[in-house]
Amino acid sequence: MPPKAASADTAELVELFKSIGLTQSKAAEAAKSPKSATTLKDIIRKKQLAGKNLDEKTGVLLAALAVQGNKLDEDERGYAVDAILDGRLKSTDQVSGNRMLGTVVMHLLSSLLVLSSRYQVSRVTPRPSRSGRL
């Protein structure tokens, strides 16, 4: 009887994947790969995407990210999901190619620069002495 449990799990995944705009066939295809299916399921749950009336194109991009998502850490994957949802990533080539990884890397570098400049400013700013003078 284990195959029925596996097929029930697959049917549940297919329904979840359809809730982000994937067609029946694309949702079934996405559910076939255990690693990608787990990643896509995590994306949907963490970003609360089920039932958000996403279009098919967005669903396809999220599924493509799930395939590539195993190469990204959680913060990078979250940034990529946000980029898909707000339209900065518009094609599967962008999501699955170096362009997406480059976008993620640029975001992380800019975040590091901001943090670095904040640290330097806090270290350079003179502090008043105990007597109240600079």
Image (cartoon, grey):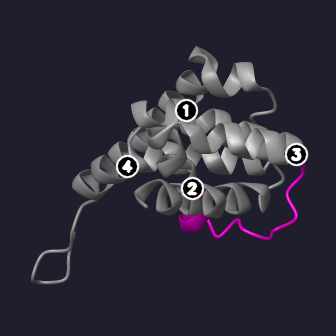
> Which residue is situated farthest in the front direction here?
1
For label 2, count other residues whose C-alpha is less than 10 Å away and answer few (under 14), some (14-19) or many (20+): few
Is residue 81 found left or right of 88 in the rendered image? left
User: Disc 1 designates what residue?
Assistant: 67
User: Disc 2 designates what residue?
Assistant: 7
User: Disc 4 designates what residue?
Assistant: 115
What amino acid is found at the position of numbered circle 4 in the picture? Leu
The numbered dot on residue 56 is 3
Residue 48: x and y in percent read 64, 70
Residue stretch in magenta = 43-55
Residue 15: x and y in percent read 72, 62
Residue 51: x and y in percent read 79, 71
- The residue nearer to you, when weighing 14 against 17, is 14
- Camera-nearest label, 1 or 2: 2
First-in-chain label (2 vs 3): 2
Q: Mark 2 falls on what kind of element? A: helix
What amino acid is found at the position of numbered circle 3 in the picture? Glu
Answer yes or no: is residue 87 visible: no
> Which residue is situated farthest in the left direction here?
130
The answer to whether marks 4 and 3 mark residues whose Cβ atoms lie closer than 8 Å is no
